[in-house]
Image (cartoon, rainbow, N blue to C red):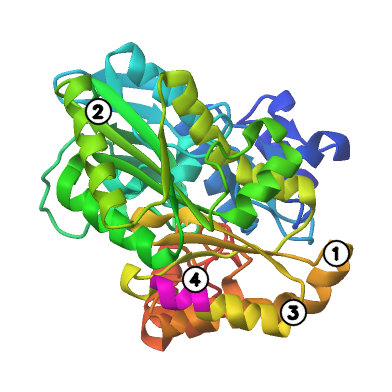
Amino acid sequence: MQAFIEHLSKILEQRYILTQDEDKAPYLTDWRKRYIGKALAVLLPSTSDEVAAIVKLCAQNQVALVPQGGNTGFCGGATPDNSGKQVVLNLKRMNQIREIDIANQTITIEAGCILRALQEKALEHGFLFPLSLGAEGSCMIGGNLATNAGGTNVLRYGNARDLCLGLEVVTAKGEIWNGIKGLRKDNTGYDLRDLFIGSEGTLGIITAAVMKLYPLPVSQWTTLVACENIASTITLLNLFQKRASSLLTGFEMMTRESLDLNEKHFPHMANPLQGNSPFTVLIELSDHESEEHVRQLLETILEEAFEVKLISNAVIASNLTQANTFWHMREHITLAQAEEGANLKHDITIPLSSLDSFIQQTDALMRDKFPGVRIINFGHLGDGNLHYNIAPPLGVDPKIFNETNERQIHELVYGQVERCKGSISAEHGVGQLKLDGLRAHKGEVAHELMRALKTALDPQNILNPHKVVSI
């Protein structure tokens, strides 16, 4: 492999070819510290041409590579294996904003651009870029597209796929597909853009993208409401969708257990609603008319919800600072889980019509089979995406509990997901975490179609092998 490393130095400066263990270490572990791999080298290209040259060299030498962005994923999709023969291709140096098209309301950015930087650049030009995630200060747009990230604004604006108009992709042959077009209509054969989005770097490496921008709303109003059961939260969602329509931009559900954990580790994030009801819902309306219009609409809907006993309490943010506090409370749940210790995460989607049944039955089965277990359930209720996470009983070592019960717990949760015709991955991707269960979940026909695509586009299996689908 020494000759391979020497050839790399013809593509990259030596300082961007990391081969020492201490230099490689930050790139070899996933965010949750669940997966720790080894790598022949970590490579830091700055242009699409450099990426293409690296991929071509890897293909010639049959060296597998793992594309990586901000390394904030939960499923090990950006972590190399333990062979020490793979290279990690981190795109953080490819962080340029290539163009902002005001008339077309689009922005063209490179894959290593941090999501928050993209949001801020859009804001500078009077636009909104609506993709919003807890990791937005460190995740990168390439990774967001590779996993088809969701977040808190999916209800109004859709997933990353819905926000993307065009891509630049390096193929497994080391060729560059230039699909950088800001077109909202382009009916010319197969949609290659959608093929690469969500493929987690297994079909090609996304190096740049054209993303949609939106006019900034004139006003936003945020409220927290208390509900006694999940059925009430779904009826409340339907009420808001009927009355507010597209003005409804956020509808996030948090259970009492999740907010109790939040307060335990972040006392300043205590739920402002008295009594800490079984379910707290965070709701946001955005308007392009006036503050008075959306405020009156919000109050009218809440009054109706009170009258029919859908909610028992509510507080409306009086200013932007308080609204941000409400959102920080929601976003800190994941951080509180990390502080509490290792837990078993399930990023799932359930049809809203089956959500009540799923939660009630799965909770009951979980508590019956694993007495004392803590269920930290929260998520993007507006699109049926639940983060159904399991923490061990108090006083039980998380590592031992997870090693002993992980398989049974996953089977229980995913069995209930299948019963409800849901999905085992909503926005976190498949990576290596859910690889083994994907065939059964997708079905034989779908799985074989995926294998055929992987084989056709990456016959040497050098792009992120053993992630999403194995060949």
Task: Report, in whole angstroms, how far the alpha carbon at label 1 lies from the one at label 2.
Answer: 48 Å
Q: Is residue 201 above or below residue 153?
A: below
Circles 1 and 2: CB atoms closer than 8 Å: no
Circles 1 and 4: CB atoms closer than 8 Å: no
> How crowded is the residue under tag 2: few (<14 C-alpha within 10 Å), some, or many (20+)?
some
Circles 3 and 2: CB atoms closer than 8 Å: no
For mark 4, give the secondary structure. Answer: loop
- Residue 399's disc is 1
Q: Nearer the viewer, residue 151 or 269?
A: 269
For mark 2, give the secondary structure. Answer: helix
For marks 1 and 2, give the one nearer the viewer.
Answer: 2
- Residue 295's disc is 2
Residue that carries the numbered disc 4 in the rendered image: 424
- Note whether residue 74 is visible: no
- Magenta-highlighted residues: 355-360
Q: Please name the amino acid that badge 4 sits on.
A: Ile
- Disc on the earlier residue, 3 or 4: 3
Residue 76: x %, y % from top left: 65, 57
Residue under the image location 12 percent in, 47 percent down: 186
Residue 248: x %, y % from top left: 26, 42
Task: Report, in whole angstroms, how far the alpha carbon at label 3 lies from the one at label 4.
Answer: 21 Å
Q: Please name the amino acid that badge 2 sits on.
A: Arg
In which quarter of the view is residue 382 placed? Answer: bottom left
> How crowded is the residue under tag 3: few (<14 C-alpha within 10 Å), some, or many (20+)?
some
- Disc on the earlier residue, 3 or 1: 3
